[in-house]
Image (cartoon, rainbow, N blue to C red):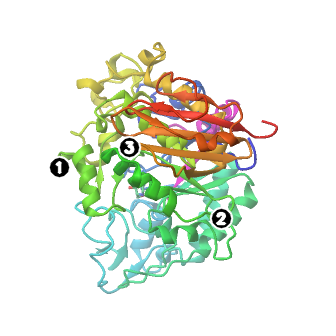
Amino acid sequence: MGDRWYSEAVVYCLDIDTYADSDGDGVGDIRGLIGRLDYLARLGVTCLWLHPIHPSPNKDDGYDATDFYNVDPRFGTLGDFAELLHQAQNRGIRVIIDLVVNHTSDQHPWFVSARSSPDSPYRDWYVWSDEEPEDRHQGMVFPGEQHETWTYDRTAKGWYYHRFYKFQPDLNMANPAVRAEVKKIMSFWLQLGVSGFRMDAAPFIIELTEPGNPNSPKDFEFLTELRQHVQWRRGDAVLLAEANVEPDQLPTFFGDSGGSANRLHMLFDFMLNGRLMLALARQDPEPVIEALRDTPALPEGGQWATFLRNHDEIDLSRLTAEQRNEVYAQFGPDEDMRIYDRGIRRRLAPMLGNDRRRLELAYSLQFSLRGTPVLRYGEEIGMGEDLSLPGRQAIRTPMQWRYQPNAGFSTADPEKLVRPVIDKGEFSYEKVNVTAQRADRTSLLAWFERMIRTLREAPEIGSGSTTHIDVPTPPGVLAHRADGSTGTMVFLHNLGTGDAVVDLSHLEPEADLPIDVLGDRSYAPVGKLDRLQLAGYGYRWIRLRRGRGF
Ligand code: NOJ
């Protein structure tokens, strides 16, 4: 892969504890994951994003670390982790890890020391206020489950700040010692061989929190510092961050006002995610067209990461209340399917009624749109959720490998499993599992393998530019194109149920032996591009032109 490997990557995210258990203790582990690398290589994945791997009391699925320099003993040892990196590299797969340094667990030795005395060397590593801050009840990320952002600590005799749950005290990034420590943590993992980080909560990391000021200033320069540091330590390492902010603020996360891409390489495209959901709910591509049109231009080297599902709720907070209700009505009709007044705690297959046509359509759309696709484990076989589990755990159930006890995830007693497997209904492991789908050339898994391979033959999707083809199309149909040095691809997606015919003959002069490379079925050849047929929920990927030397 070239320098900007991340532009052409296929990222797959997983929790080690629910992926594969090698030692039968009920918790997935690194050795279990190593045993699944061939599966991931075959799927076409080129980069793994591992959710937090550090020791943790696990009150927020590992996003509450107690030691940034180790792996959770439940997952294995640092030695196992180094072996994972080696084995992944042998298969051409890079590994990035979650970097969760906005906060620690309240059980982290730094916080234990900090709260114990005002003289602790770690006191200033956290954010304190002697007085009760006026904005104590503002800025909560988990409404309904979190009641304040400042909590009084009796031992410390002071208020500490926590943007997230109260067991996640925020680190004080205004303190140079903390900044140096964050760089040290990054160096440590880069030295071991990770290819970068998924940076948790980027907008909050750079917050210079002032008690009583709910709009505390942000220090974007810290992102520049981190980028520089990472690049010096490992030139090809990538920073992929979570920053769910207003669109006009996004460019500042990629680079400074001078236009250089000197901060984060990649951001998750939350805006597109919400618009994709709205488009699928309405069966109308207009919200996606708006997203393509309205998203700010990125500096050279900046890249979006697209996703339909990740490990959290589907966050619809960037939609209007009315739009959100439209999505709820289609995909989260029951109160129990929703969470935090803004999202849906379901996987995609159940949301789309387990309709294979709609699932292919949705993922074809995500993977053909600009940016680097991120796929969540289990989506490739169409796993479901377990709404009887609390909160976001509903979509964090064990991977379904086989029709065997515990879905082939673990040999432990079922009650010892980190989370129960889905064993009832149409998404039970009896019906949805890897082994069955591997044996079936028409399965969703087989489709993902083919689709990802096709994507990898079309690098212009990830590294070129993506635009809406603005011609009259039948209702429900989106036409877009990707242009890059490797050529041009054209895509048609029919979000509606009716058959359609699309006329793209104006592109004929550009075409050079145009050919269908992927579709929901075999269509009549593209011909002069003037009568392109498309079934309801159908899609076509057409190679219009190959670039020179490709
Ligand atoms: C974002 C993560 O995706 C989420 O799972 C977590 O709860 C918060 N950050 C806090 O770390």
Q: Eyeballing the image, is 16 above or below 450? A: below
Q: Which residue is denoted by mark 2 in the rendering?
A: 299
Disc number for residue 34:
none
| Secondary structure beneath label 1 | helix
- Which numbered disc flags the more N-terminal residue, 2 or 3? 2
Residue 7 seen in the figure: no
Does 449 lie within the magenta span?
no
Q: Position of residue 401 (x, y in %)?
A: 42, 22
Q: Eyeballing the image, is 8 above or below 296? A: above
**Occupied quadrant, residue 487:** top right
Residue type, label 3:
Gly
Work out whether residue 525 or residue 163 is closer to the camera in this orientation and state it. Answer: 525
Instruction: Point out the frontmost of discs 2 and 3.
Output: 3
Disc number for residue 476:
3
Horizontal side of residue 336 vs 76, given as left or right: left
| Magenta highlight range | 72-101
Q: Which residue is denoted by mark 1 in the rendering?
A: 335
- Which numbered disc flags the more N-terminal residue, 1 or 3? 1
| Secondary structure beneath label 3 | loop
Work out whether residue 159 or residue 230 is closer to the camera in this orientation and state it. Answer: 230
- Alpha carbons under labels 1 and 3: distance apart: 29 Å
Q: Eyeballing the image, is 137 above or below 489? A: below
Q: Position of residue 98 (x, y in %)?
A: 52, 51
Residue type, label 2:
Pro
Instruction: Point out the frontmost of discs 1 and 3.
Output: 3
In this view, the residue farthest toward the right is 549
